Image: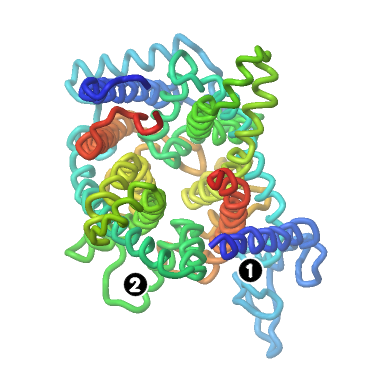
């Protein structure tokens, strides 16, 4: 059982390596158009004019968008930003959730109540709906610091869940005999946290964090399907008509741009950004499960 | 917890009230977010349209909240929707269509999820199922919109079933199936883990040593104890189901509550939030979801108490 499970970690790390390769070396690959130049028109061999969207061909393995930009290149170029976005959000989530969970460990008092309310509030409206509600608030749409606020709020929405997990785990740890030993020795609370609680919590936090990266990817993808962007600019697209345009290149924007295809039964391109998102979710899920086996099964055996 | 067995009943009652109190507080928080003033300052400067979000202003915020409730009190309704009907009428319609889907999907995911978990448990005991766990890993990592897209592609191209809309039996079964795919996997995982955790315990070995039949041990001991663990996952299951509901209704164009909720945000790419923002619809739908989740939470408490009358956390003693 253990042997077969450890494959999770190995395969996950292999997939991660490939992801890192595309993040940092992808733009240098020969078939990737680093500048993402639009090709407004193209002549075929038999002197016919073709306009974008181009169908899949050796030049555009996955076709192009309506400006003639190569789809595959966009996916590869978008990898870095997408991964940065999701890792940042997951990191912020734990940055808020872990201290909150530690403060709420007693299961009563203000912080415990706060965690319960946070956890509950965002479970009545599913995460996705609360994210839509909050991200579409006008002061955020036109804020100069939108990126910061969006990252923070997306992290905050599920920070209660993280805090709850940490609080429960800490409470379990408190029951361990060696904790009592620490208390009897009269250690300062800082030392208790550093030397007693954190080592017990760390594996759990690392596993949870890895799995959460996958969850954030999923959430951002869902937001993309509903055309809500993380990074956006309000630009004039017609006379006196302005629209939010996602100028940066990430998978979510690509997904959103092709969203209307869903209703027309055209599936040619929309699958690929969705598949890329699935790849990332799978990678982090595999690593998370692998780490869980590696770190947490040891404890169970004791 | 040092409560004795006789206090078990009291404990359950207090957890009922606690979940109710927290829900109401959560509802107030949602109201404060929903009623946050959403006016935009638009002006034309030269040849350019300039829009800025209003900065935070406590008096306009308070005004927005009080005027909403004053109107609601005077009109005995949370407002008029974009279709000229009352909010209550619209939400009741949409909720009715969604409720049948939610109920169907909930039953389906509980039954099939627990069933799949039991099968997984049995096969994993007999042999190492590396392939089984790998395939369920891949399925779990699939974004819900990708799964819906794949099924949509299949249904449109290869079956005579109408994918969009909500006509006939297929129009009901399709959303139920789509909504329950991921919850089934979730409950299967929970069941598998709970059965595995109980199977290795000492008292099961004792029961086997006594020569009780496997079926009897499974029904009376393993499954019964695992059910308490599964019951505590019922409300996460339900929330999971609701978030799937939005994706399914949105992508199928199914006129249910989650779709109506999304419509009420009136999110548009040009202004973010349009003039047809309907706070009443959002509040009432959220309230309905809250009632549903509360009911499920209470159901979970009742199941847990019926199966295992020991007070919460008693097992750790």
How far separated are the C-alphas under marks 1 and 2? 26 Å
Residue B261 % position (x, y): 33, 40
| Left or right relative to B265: residue B89 | left
| Quadrant of image for the N terminus of chain B | top left
Q: Residues within 10 Å of mark 2 (few under 14, many from 20)?
A: some
SS for callout 2: helix
Residue B235 % position (x, y): 32, 39
Res B288 visible = no
**Residue topped by disc 1:** A64
B178 relative to A269, above or below: above
Residue at 50% across / 70% down in the picture? B131
| Left or right relative to B85: residue B58 | right
What is the chain letter for disc 2? Answer: B
SS for callout 1: loop
Residue at 41% across / 64% down in the picture? B125
Q: Quadrant of residue B284?
A: top left
Q: Between residues B102 and A68, which one lies in front from this camera angle?
A: B102
Residue A142 % position (x, y): 59, 31
Q: Between residues B107 and A134, which one lies in front from this camera angle?
A: B107
Q: Quadrant of residue B253?
A: bottom left
Which numbered disc, 1 or 2, marks the residue closer to the eye? 2
């Amino acid at each position: 059982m253990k042997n077969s499970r450890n494959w999770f970690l190995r395969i996950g790390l292999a997939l991660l390596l490939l992801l890192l390769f595309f993040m940092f070396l992808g733009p240098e690959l020969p078939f990737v158009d680093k500048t993402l130049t639009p090709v407004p028109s193209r002549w075929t061999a038999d002197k016919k004019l073709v306009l974008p969207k181009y169908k899949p061909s050796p030049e555009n393995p996955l076709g192009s968008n309506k400006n003639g930009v190569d789809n595959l290149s966009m996916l590869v170029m978008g990898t870095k930003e997408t991964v940065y976005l999701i890792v940042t959000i997951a990191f912020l989530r734990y940055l808020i959730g872990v201290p909150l969970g530690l403060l709420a460990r007693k299961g009563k008092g203000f912080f415990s109540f706060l965690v319960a309310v946070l956890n509950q509030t965002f479970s009545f409206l599913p995460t996705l709906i609360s994210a839509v509600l909050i991200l579409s608030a006008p002061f955020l749409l036109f804020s100069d610091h939108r990126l910061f606020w969006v990252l923070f709020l997306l992290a905050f929405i599920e920070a209660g869940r993280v805090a709850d997990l940490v609080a429960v785990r800490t409470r379990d740890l408190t029951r361990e005999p060696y904790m009592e030993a620490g208390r009897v020795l009269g250690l300062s609370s800082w030392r208790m946290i550093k030397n007693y609680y954190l080592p017990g919590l760390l594996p759990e936090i690392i596993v949870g964090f890895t799995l959460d990266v996958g969850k954030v990817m999923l959430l951002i993808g869902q937001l993309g399907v509903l055309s809500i962007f993380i990074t956006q600019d309000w630009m004039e697209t017609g006379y006196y008509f302005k629209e939010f345009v996602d100028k940066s290149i990430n998978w979510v924007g690509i997904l959103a741009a092709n969203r209307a295809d869903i209703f027309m039964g055209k599936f040619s391109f929309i699958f690929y950004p969705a598949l890329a998102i699935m790849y990332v979710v799978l990678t982090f899920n595999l690593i998370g499960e692998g780490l869980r086996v590696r770190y947490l099964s040891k404890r169970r055996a004791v | 917890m040092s409560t004795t067995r006789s206090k078990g009943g009291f404990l359950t009652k207090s957890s009922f009230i606690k979940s109710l109190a927290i829900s109401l507080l959560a509802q107030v928080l949602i109201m404060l977010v929903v009623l946050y003033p959403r006016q935009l300052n638009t002006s034309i400067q030269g040849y350019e349209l300039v829009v800025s979000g209003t900065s935070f202003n406590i008096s306009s915020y308070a005004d927005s909240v009080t005027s909403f409730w004053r109107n609601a009190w005077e009109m005995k309704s949370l407002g008029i929707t974009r279709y000229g009907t009352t909010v209550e009428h619209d939400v009741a319609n949409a909720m009715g269509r969604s409720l049948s889907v939610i109920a169907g999907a909930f039953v389906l995911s509980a039954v099939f999820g627990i069933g799949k978990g039991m099968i997984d448990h049995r096969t994993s005991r007999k042999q190492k199922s590396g392939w089984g766990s790998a395939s369920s890993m891949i399925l779990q990592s699939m974004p819900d919109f990708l799964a819906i897209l794949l099924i949509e592609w299949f249904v449109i191209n290869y079956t005579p079933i109408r994918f969009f809309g909500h006509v006939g039996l297929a129009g009901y079964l399709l959303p139920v199936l789509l909504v329950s795919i991921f919850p089934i996997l979730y409950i299967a995982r929970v069941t598998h883990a709970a059965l595995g955790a109980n199977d290795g315990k000492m008292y099961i070995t004792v029961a086997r040593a006594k020569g009780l039949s496997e079926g009897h041990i499974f029904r009376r001991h393993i499954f019964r104890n695992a059910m308490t663990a599964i019951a505590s996952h019922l409300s996460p299951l339900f929330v999971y189901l609701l978030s799937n509901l939005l994706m399914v209704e949105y992508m199928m164009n199914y006129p249910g509550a989650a779709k109506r909720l999304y419509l009420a945000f009136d999110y548009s790419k040009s202004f973010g939030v349009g003039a047809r923002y309907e706070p009443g619809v959002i509040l009432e739908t959220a309230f309905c979801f809250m009632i549903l989740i509360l009911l499920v939470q209470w159901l979970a408490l009742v199941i847990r108490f019926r199966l295992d009358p020991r007070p919460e956390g008693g097992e750790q003693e």
